Image (cartoon, rainbow, N blue to C red):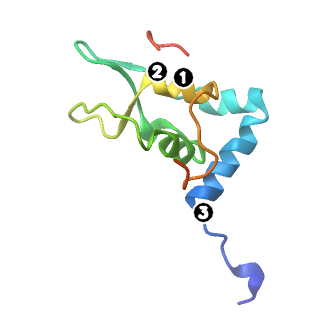
Amino acid sequence: MNEHDLALPFTPNLLVRASNDTRKRPTLFREVLAGVQAIEHPNGPVVVRVSDIPEPHRTAFKTALRDLGRPAIDSEGELAFFRDWCDWVDGKLQRKTANQTATGSQC
């Protein structure tokens, strides 16, 4: 085995940087994230499933959410508020690395 056979570890910081690099190309960034849909629950908040967010953006988004409250709805898995998702997509909710500390259903 030589140095070219070693896999590069996908650390949270590397994934956040990759997401930030994609953000520099707004059309591609929005196309990649277009599949993330708002989930409207009766008597509950509008949310997104974190598992629906493709990497590296999932890790970048989770890093940005680290200190914020998260909704919990039985049998839905890990969720985030849709307004936080829209803010993150619009660049209003982000952190540069993993070590740093809306209404309706459309962003």
Find disc 1 in the rendering and name its residue: 86
| Few, some or many residues within 10 Å of mark 1 (<14, 14–19, 20+) | some
- Mark 3 residue element: loop
Mark 1–mark 3 distance (CA, rounded to whole Å): 25 Å
Mark 3 or mark 2, whichever is nearer to me: 2
User: How many other residues sit within 10 Å of disc 3, few (<14), some (14-19) or many (≥20)?
Assistant: few
Q: Please tell me which residue is depicted at 58% across the width and 62% down the height of the picture.
A: 11
Q: Which mark is residue 25?
A: none
Left/right of residue 3 with respect to residue 64 in the rendered view = right
Q: Residues within 10 Å of mark 2 (few under 14, many from 20)?
A: many
User: Depth check: 57 or 62 in front?
Assistant: 62
Q: CA distance from mark 2 to mark 1?
A: 5 Å
- Residue lying furthest front in this view? 101
Q: Earlier in the sequence, mark 1 or mark 3?
A: 3
| Residue tagged 2 | 83
Which residue matches tag 3? 10
Q: Is residue 21 above or below residue 79?
A: below
Marked residue nearer the N-terminal end (3 or 2): 3
* Residue 30 picture quarter: top right
Please state which amino acid type lies under the numbered disc 3.
Phe
Q: Position of residue 2 (x, y in %)?
A: 75, 88
In the image, what residue type sits under mark 1?
Cys
- Quadrant where the C terminus sits is top right
The spot of residue 43 in percent (x, y) is: 22, 13
The residue shown at (47%, 14%) is 102
- Residue 17, horizontal then vertical, whole percent: 68, 50
